Image (cartoon, helix red, strand yellow):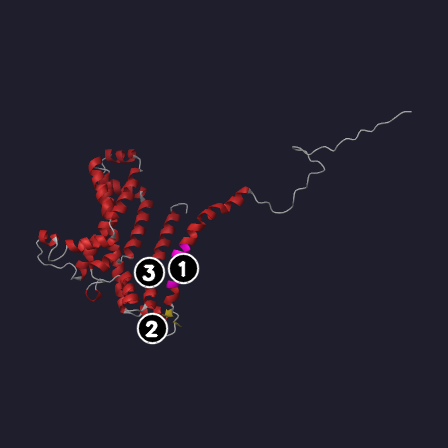
Amino acid sequence: MTTHTTSLKAPPAAGKGGAGPAARPPRRGRSVSPANRSGWTPWLYLLPALVLLAGLLVYPIYQLGLISFLEYTQAQVSGGEPTTFQGFGNYATLFNDSQFWQVLLATVVFAAACVVSTLFVGCALAVLLTRIRALPRLALMMAALGAWATPAITGSTVWVFLFDPDFGPVNKVLGLGDFSWTYGRYSAFALVLLEVLWCSFPFVMVTVYAGIRAIPTEVLEAASLDGASQWRIWRTIMAPMLKPILIVVTIQSIIWDFKVFTQIYVMTNGGGIAGQNLVLNVYAYQKAFASSQYSLGSAIGVVMLVILLAVTLVYLRLVRRQGEEL
């Protein structure tokens, strides 16, 4: 009797490159690549900072814009009268006020003078830093950084003492007697300009000096050997190569000088005699807190915000035009 045995073979297991019966077909649908999954990772890291900025910037700006459309005075703050919606009434009142246009013009002219002076002094000293030895350069840098680190209210108080008509050493050295720098409109603006220049030029100096150090020395040496003067080297070589840096310091100086408050308020005692030295920031403070017209003060703040946003957009456009990656 012959016995036939049948061998049972197990199904081949799915291995590398092999597809057995247990292998599942790939699911249809949209697959998410690791690159797409990691695209949200930077935003997750930035989320805490974005939340903080939203609380510190977005909400106050929203409240500023909201109050500018309301009738919001001391009567509404105390609850004596209801808050009413005014639409653009506060802006119409503001734009029909001749003092507002005078203050706006004074702010633009004063800020422009501060920016031009700061850029001139900062760039000149930056070039000087490249021409002097290490020890004088270190002394100049430390002195400039000390002026930069001084709080605005402290610097303003010191400058008021230096130019005091009775006890200030400046009048004694110049032989001006009891001349009051803060009495006249233009002399008061000039005094504030000097203080703003004193605390602002170090930023321009340090930034431009760092940019000059990045320029290849061979280019500058070749220009010197060709007989080019320092002014021509700056105008034809340094300035074009430093154009991105100069744009940055110019825009930042415009923003800082346009919203000057502390120096004007401290050195002219709140805006000068009969408001002759008012700028927009101090004017908004007087309207909002001295006169309790919070809605008008908010409207001035919104106008300042729009102007500074326009300056920022111009800066971004210039950066894009130069091919910078934002």
Circle 1: residue type? Tyr
Q: Residue 70's x, y, as percent?
A: 38, 69
Q: Nearer the viewer, mark 2 or mark 3?
A: 2
The residue at which mark 2 appears reads as 75
- Whole-number angstrom distance, CA of label 1 to CA of label 3: 17 Å
Circle 2: residue type? Ala
Instruction: Say which element carries label 3.
Output: helix
Sooner in the amino-acid sequence: mark 2 or mark 1: 1
Q: In this rendering, would 100 be left or right of 175?
A: right
The answer to whether the residue labelled 2 contacts the one labelled 1, judged by CB atoms less than 8 Å apart, is no
Sooner in the amino-acid sequence: mark 1 or mark 3: 1
The answer to whether the residue labelled 2 contacts the one labelled 3, judged by CB atoms less than 8 Å apart, is no
How many C-alpha atoms fall within 10 Å of the one at disc 2: few (<14), some, or many (≥20)?
A: some
Q: Which residues are magenta?
A: 53-64
- Identify whether 109 is placed above or below 231: below
How many C-alpha atoms fall within 10 Å of the one at disc 3: few (<14), some, or many (≥20)?
A: some
Residue 27's image quarter? Answer: top right
Q: In this rendering, would 204 be left or right of 176?
A: right
Sooner in the amino-acid sequence: mark 2 or mark 3: 2
Q: Which mark is residue 140?
A: none
Q: In this rendering, would 136 be left or right of 313?
A: left
Q: Residue 176's x, y, as percent?
A: 9, 56
The residue at which mark 3 appears reads as 304
Q: Residue 192's x, y, as percent?
A: 21, 56
The residue at which mark 1 appears reads as 59
Q: Nearer the viewer, mark 1 or mark 3?
A: 1
What residue lies at 33% left-to-right and 60% top-to-bottom?
A: 304
What residue lies at 30% left-to-right and 50% top-to-bottom?
A: 250
- Whole-number angstrom distance, CA of label 2 to CA of label 1: 24 Å
